[in-house]
Amino acid sequence: MKKILLQFAIFLVSATSFIFAQGTAKQKTINISGNIGLFYDMYDFSEENYPNFRAKYPENLFRLNANATIQLGKHFSIPFGINITNQKTLYNLPNLPNESIVDYIQNPKNNISIHPKYKWVQAHIGTHTPDYSELSTGDINIFGAGLDLNPGKFIFSFNYGISQRAIEQDNLLNTVGAYAQNIIATRIGFGKIDGSKFTINIVKIEDDVTSLINAPTEIKPIEGITIAPLIEVKFGKKIFFTTETAVSIFTSNLLNPFEIDNEIVDAVKDIITINASSKGDFSHKSSLEWKSKKLTLGGEVKYIGPGFVPAGFRNIEKDILDYKFKSSIKLFKGKTNINGMFGIRTNNLKNTTLQSTKRIISNLNVFTKLTKKLSLNASYSNFGFNNNEINNVLRIEMINNTYNVSPSYKFKTTSINHLISLNWNLNNFDQFDTTSSSFVASQSKSYGLNYNLFFKNMPLNINLMGLHLNNQTPASSFKMKNYSASFSYKFYDKKIKPTLLFNLAQISKNPFTTDKRFSTKLKISYKINKKLQFKFAYKLNKYTYGTSRPNALTKENRLQFSLLKKF
């Protein structure tokens, strides 16, 4: 069945290529744009005195990736994506017996989708991600169908699909298991989907308690619903305002036998299951931003209640209050750009846990072009975290400061263009230690040099790179020296480009002696024509270990082939 599906996908791509060719002859009334790629990787390794070394890649990996759009006339288009592989699963999951074609397409290792669009109507078939707002849905990948309507100023969207496949618990494979999960989402309002609008977003997820033969011991079936009115307004060309308030009801265990009996619960029991594990809460976010050609000012406030669970997001930090201010400015005719942000986050607002914390987040980035040859990029970021406990045993306090300076200098000689880049990075991390009742400092420093040579009279590029990293903590130290050199050349009318890369790394971890890693990589790209390209790559990794693994040695070989077609 997999072979049949693969042949069908290849046939589909071939057919679209034919359509494109025919469309050109018919004054391009039918066009296709995008790309398609066939990829095949081979990998093997050998080891000495390292029996538990884990392979980094599959032995044989085939991938077919196609992302293109068929344009039929002026208003009708069919964006589609095909991403399939011969892997059994993307995760450490048990094999699925007698996998049907529907199961194969639904498998998370594959991604097949079609998004036909005609004027203000667009459908979504297959794998897609509904993205309504920050407090409703935006990061859950589903396999199903969807519809977006935006005639005039009317907005309507609907999505339904599977957001989680059923997985039986398997103690031998250390698989905790998961219930099948469905998601349904809709929004209605007025405005433009990609512009100013007012919408009411409703999202619901529900686990199927009958999807597993044996109930997992660590996972409970859930159900949740989120209702989130959203306003996004653009005033003129400079002011942007967004506000959203969301309410959620979330049941963390559908198998909980203790039901709640009152009039409010009875009124919504046909919409969502409510029992002793259910909870409800709200959240809010508002932001205001003013933009001009040279100056940007903006602010944001966000509150997430302790019991709020957005149905359309996998994870979110709860019980927090955020204040953020950000700004950017361009000076000296755009030669200097300054971007900054400052924020304060507090949690445990309703004292639902023993401790409260406060975090300060700030960053500043400055880029300036000092001369035609010399430019400088510098940045600073701060992250602070502390609770309100004065008892040293329970006290939590940490401060992280990062500094980065990166100058670059470019100049020309008779036959070569030179580009030299330096990088200096310092990271200080101070944390209060409850045992010693004092601050413990960790520090990481790195120095980097990049030197690029571009030859004028020949298609030769040379890149030299060096990096020194030193990480010190009271308990250990880590040092790394990494050097690399790459050489690329173009010949045969610049259609063939071979690149040879050498890399040597020395890694020292106290109290062990140095580990050494040598790698080399050969890449060859061949531009068959303007739209068709073949690529080949071979990489060898040799890792010799110090006293951390006495007499241990690993070797890895990886071959990669690809054929890329652009439309």
Image (spheres, grey):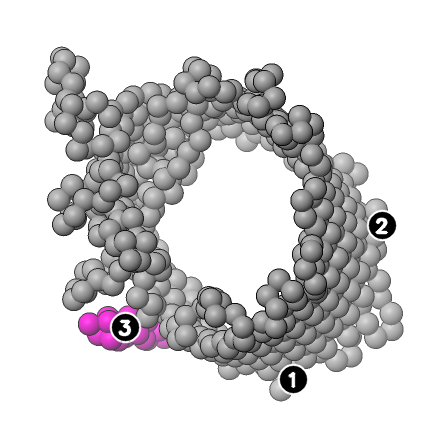
Residue receiving disc 1: 491
Q: Could you say which quadrant of the image residue 249 lies in?
A: top left
In the figure, 35 relative to 192: above or below? below
Determine the secondary structure under disc 2: loop
Q: Who comes first in sequence, dot 2 or dot 1? A: 2
- Within 10 Å of disc 2 (Cα), the crowding (few <14, some 14-19, many 20+) is few
* Residue 267 visible here: no
Which residue ends up furthest to the bottom in the rendered image? Answer: 492
Which disc is residue 371 wearing? 2
Does residue 298 appear to the left or right of 562 in the view shown?
right
Q: Nearer the viewer, residue 181 or 312?
A: 181
Q: Position of residue 304 (x, y in %)?
A: 42, 24
The residue that mark 3 highlights is: 6
> Considering the image in quadrants, where does the C terminus appear?
bottom left
Label 1 residue SS? loop
Our reading of the magenta stretch's main secondary structure is helix
Range drawn in magenta: 1-23
